[in-house]
Amino acid sequence: MGMSVTISAAEAEDAEQIFRLQYLCFQSEAELYGNYRIEPLVQSLDSVRSELETDCVLVARLGDEVVGAVRGTLDADGTALIGKLCVHPRIQGHGLGARLLRAVEETLAGRGGTARFQLFTGERSESNLRLYRKAGYARIGDRTGADGVRVIVLEKEATSYVVSA
C-alpha cells in the first residue's frame, strides 16, 4: 500500500463514509451480543451529520478512504465523553484505535475545562477493554443500555493533558 494513515477532524462530506464504516465495524459487536439493535447500527445518516456539526469527530484516513473514526463531547462538569471508536476490520490490530483514542483525548483536553475522560463498552468486548485499560482507563461502574446490552463504564483523569499557562 505504501500510504500512511493520517488523523484529522472530520469534514461534513465524511458523513457517509463514517456511517458505512460504523455499520461495518459494529457488526462484530452485534454478533457478540446477538443484538443487531445496538445504537451504532441503528443510527441514521442524518444523526451522523448532526454529530459532525456539534461534536468533536475525528477520522483516520488512508488516502481518501476513512478507515477509522471516533467522537467526543465535553459536558458541563468537565467530563469528556468518548464514543463510537471504530477501525476498519482489515487494519485492526495495528494501533490505530489507540492513536484515535489519544487524538480525541488531546483534542478535547485542548478545548479547556476537561477534568476526566469517560467511555463505555460492552462487558464481553475483551479487545476493547484491553485497549482502554492499556490507555489508562479504569472501571467505574456498569449499566444496561437502552438496547439491553450490559456495558462497563470506564474513566481516567485528564491530568496528563494539563497545559501550563
Image (cartoon, rainbow, N blue to C red):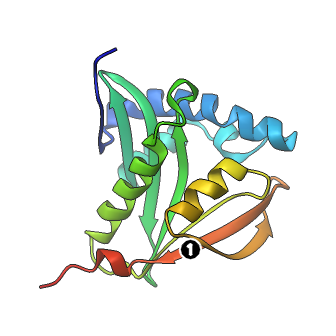
Image-quadrant location for residue 101: bottom left
Image-quadrant location for residue 38: top right
Q: Is residue 46 above or below residue 80?
A: above
The quarter in which the C terminus is drawn is bottom left
Image-quadrant location for residue 23: top right
* Residue 137 located left or right of residue 64: right
Residue picked out by circle 1: 155
The three-letter code of the residue at mark 1 reads Glu
**Residue at the image position 54 percent from the left and 61 percent from the top:** 134
**Residue at the image position 37 percent from the left and 31 percent from the top:** 14
User: Horizontal and vertical percent for residue 57?
Assistant: 39, 49
The answer to whether residue 94 of the structure is visible from this angle is: yes
User: Horizontal and vertical percent for residue 120?
Assistant: 64, 62
The quarter in which the N terminus is drawn is top left
Label 1 Cα crowd, 10 Å radius (few <14 / some 14-19 / many 20+): many
Q: Is residue 134 or residue 64 the one in the foreground?
A: 134
Q: Is residue 156 above or below residue 83?
A: below
**Residue at the image position 45 percent from the left and 36 percent from the top:** 68
**Residue at the image position 54 percent from the left and 55 percent from the top:** 83
**Residue at the top extreme?**
1
* Residue 134 located left or right of residue 11: right
